[in-house]
C-alpha cells in the first residue's frame, strides 16, 4: 500500500459509512418516477460521442425501447415513431453511462432509506454502473432487486468480503475463495496484510473456480508478483510508487525515501509488467490527495458543497480523520503525490488500461460527486478529456469484455447520460446533467433535482 506519514494514513477498510451505529433510522425515501410510459424514447438533435474512436456525430437521433438502443442516425430524414416520447437534445451530448470502478455499496446495517439515497447519488451524477469492493450477502440481494427494477440505482458488480490479514493461511484462503465464488460474488477483493502463501492460494483457487480478483497489493507480495499471478486491477496505484526504486524490498517502506530514488526507467518497467498481464489501474487520485495533501478536514469542508447529501455525523467523522500537517509534512506528501501523478500519466501513455474510480464513500468522497473530483485529479496527472471519458465508459466494457455496453450504438444497453455542452472539450460538462437513462428508464433533470433537494433537506434539519 502507498503509505503517507501516520497522521495521514486512515485505515481504508474502516472508513466506509458506519451508518448503523451513527444514524437514527429514517423513512424510506421516495424514488422519482419515470416519465409516463410510451412506446419508446427518442433523443432528438443530440451530439453523440464515440469514446473508442474519439469522434463526435452532430445532430443525431437516438431511439430507445425495451431497454436497448434501437437506432442511431442523422436527424435529417429520420422519422420518429408515432407516440414515442421525445427528449430535445440540441446543445446537449449523449454519452454512455459512467462507471464507478471502486465503490462501496449499501449493506444490511444501514438505516432504512440510506441505501436508496446512496444509489441515487450515483445515478444523479451519471453513474450507471458500480463495481463494489467490500461485499456482504445483502449486496447480492440488492443486485438482484436492481436487475429486476425493484430499486432505482446503477447496475452492480458485487465484490466479496475482503481477503486480508497476516492471520489468513493458505488453506483458509482457498476455502474462502470457493465459498465466495459459490455464493455468487462477481469478483474477489484482496486487501492488505496477506502473506505470499495465502495470496498464492487465493490466485490458484480463483483460477480454478473462474473468478477474478483485484484491489490492494500486500506489501509482502509485491506488485510484480501480484500482476504475474493474475490480479486484474491494481486499485489506488497500490504498491506502484513502492516499486519505483531499483533497490526493491518487499514489506513496509518509507515512501519519502523511495521517491528520492524513483526513476522514469523503473516506471517504464512497471508499465511493462502491467501490459504483459493485461492488468488495469483504478487510481483513486482525489482520495489520496485528500489524506496525503496535509490539509486539515475542517479546512476542506467549505470546498465540498456535496457534503450536504451526507449525514452530518459521517462528515464530522471524516473531518476528524483528516488532520492536516505542517509545512514539512505537506512537502513530503506533495513529493509522493507528484510521483503518483507521473506514474498515472506514464501508465496511460504506455497503453495500460485506466478505469475511473474513487473509493466512494470514503473521506470526502461523496458517491457520484467524487467522480468529478477524480476527473479533475486525472487531468492534473496529464490525462486528456478523451482519455478520461474512455476510462469511464469503453475501457470498462473492454475490462469486462462486454459487447453491448459502454457506447451509444444500436443493440447496446440503454444506460445513458445526457449532458449540456461538449465534454470532449470541457469535462466540466459532465456536471451539467439534463437526465439519466438506466436500462431504458428515463430520469429527467427535474426529478433528479427534486430528489437531491429532499436528501439535502433531511440532513439539514
Image (cartoon, helix red, strand yellow):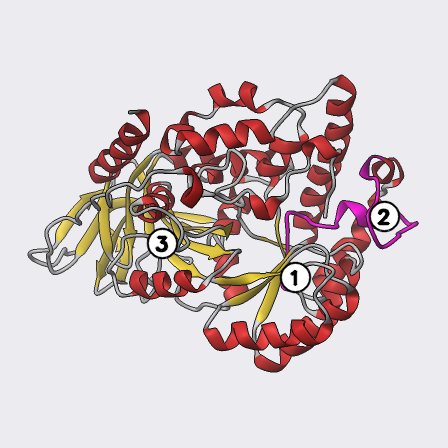
Whole-Å distance between the Cαs marked 3 and 1?
Answer: 25 Å
Q: Characterize the magenta stretch by its predominant secondary structure.
A: loop
**Circle 3 is placed at which residue position?**
154
Residue at screen point 79% across, 51% down = 268
Residue 91 image point, x, y percent: 29, 35
User: Would you call the spot at circle 2 few (<14 residues within 10 Å), some (14-19), or many (20 or more)?
Assistant: few
- Give left or right: position of 219 versus 310: right
Q: In what quadrant of the picture does the C terminus appear? A: top left
Residue at screen point 33% across, 62% down = 413
User: Would you call the spot at circle 3 few (<14 residues within 10 Å), some (14-19), or many (20 or more)?
Assistant: many
In depth, the one of 105 and 289 nearer the eye is 105
Q: Are marks 1 and 2 in contact (CB under 8 Å)?
A: no
- Tell me where the magenta segment starts and ends, as one range: 232-256
Depth check, mark 3 against mark 2: the one in front is 3
**Circle 2 is placed at which residue position?**
265
Rendered image: mark on residue 279: 1
Q: Quadrant of residue 320?
A: top right
Amino acid at each position: 500500500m502507498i503509505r503517507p506519514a501516520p497522521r495521514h494514513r486512515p485505515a481504508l477498510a474502516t472508513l466506509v459509512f458506519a451508518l448503523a451505529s451513527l444514524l437514527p433510522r429514517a423513512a424510506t425515501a421516495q424514488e422519482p418516477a419515470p416519465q409516463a410510459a410510451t412506446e419508446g424514447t427518442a433523443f432528438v438533435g443530440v451530439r453523440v460521442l464515440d469514446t473508442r474512436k474519439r469522434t463526435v456525430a452532430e445532430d443525431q437521433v437516438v431511439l430507445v425501447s425495451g431497454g436497448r438502443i434501437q437506432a442511431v442516425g442523422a436527424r435529417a430524414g429520420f422519422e420518429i415513431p408515432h407516440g414515442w416520447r421525445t427528449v430535445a437534445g440540441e446543445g446537449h451530448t449523449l454519452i454512455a453511462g459512467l462507471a464507478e470502478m471502486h465503490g462501496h455499496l449499501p449493506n444490511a446495517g444501514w438505516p432504512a432509506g440510506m441505501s436508496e439515497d446512496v444509489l441515487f447519488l450515483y445515478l444523479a451524477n451519471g453513474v450507471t454502473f458500480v463495481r463494489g469492493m467490500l461485499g456482504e450477502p445483502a449486496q447480492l440481494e440488492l443486485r438482484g432487486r436492481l436487475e429486476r427494477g425493484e430499486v432505482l440505482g446503477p447496475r452492480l458488480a458485487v465484490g466479496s468480503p475482503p481477503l486480508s490479514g497476516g492471520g489468513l493461511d493458505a488453506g483458509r484462503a482457498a476455502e474462502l475463495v470457493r465459498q465466495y465464488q459459490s455464493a455468487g460474488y462477481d469478483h474477489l477483493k484482496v486487501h492488505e496484510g496477506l502473506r505470499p502463501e495465502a495470496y498464492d492460494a487465493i490466485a490458484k483457487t480463483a483460477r480454478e473456480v473462474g473468478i477474478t480478483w483485484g484491489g490492494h497489493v500486500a506489501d509482502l507480495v509485491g506488485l510484480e508478483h501480484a500482476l504475474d499471478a493474475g490480479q486484474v486491477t491494481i486499485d489506488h496505484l497500490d504498491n506502484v510508487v513502492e516499486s519505483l526504486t531499483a533497490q526493491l524490498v518487499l514489506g513496509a517502506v518509507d515512501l519519502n525515501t523511495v521517491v528520492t530514488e524513483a526513476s522514469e526507467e523503473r516506471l517504464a518497467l512497471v508499465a511493462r509488467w502491467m501490459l504483459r498481464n493485461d492488468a488495469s489501474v483504478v487510481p483513486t487520485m482525489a482520495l489520496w490527495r485528500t489524506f496525503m495533501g496535509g490539509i486539515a478536514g475542517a479546512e476542506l469542508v467549505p470546498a465540498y458543497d456535496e457534503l450536504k447529501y451526507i449525514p452530518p455525523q459521517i462528515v464530522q467523522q471524516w473531518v476528524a480523520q483528516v488532520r492536516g500537517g505542517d509545512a514539512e509534512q505537506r512537502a513530503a506528501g506533495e513529493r509522493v503525490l507528484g510521483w503518483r501523478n507521473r506514474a498515472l500519466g506514464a501508465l496511460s501513455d504506455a497503453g495500460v488500461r485506466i478505469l475511473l474510480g474513487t473509493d466512494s464513500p470514503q473521506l470526502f468522497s461523496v458517491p457520484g460527486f467524487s467522480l468529478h473530483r477524480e476527473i479533475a485529479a486525472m487531468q492534473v496527472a496529464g490525462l486528456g478529456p478523451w482519455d478520461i471519458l474512455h476510462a469511464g465508459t469503453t475501457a470498462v466494457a473492454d475490462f469486462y469484455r462486454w459487447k453491448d455496453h459502454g457506447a451509444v450504438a444500436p443493440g447496446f444497453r440503454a444506460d445513458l447520460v445526457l449532458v449540456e455542452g461538449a465534454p470532449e472539450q470541457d469535462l466540466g460538462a459532465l456536471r451539467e446533467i439534463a437526465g439519466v437513462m438506466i436500462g431504458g428508464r428515463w430520469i429527467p433533470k427535474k426529478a433528479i433535482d427534486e430528489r437531491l433537494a429532499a436528501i439535502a433537506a433531511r440532513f439539514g434539519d
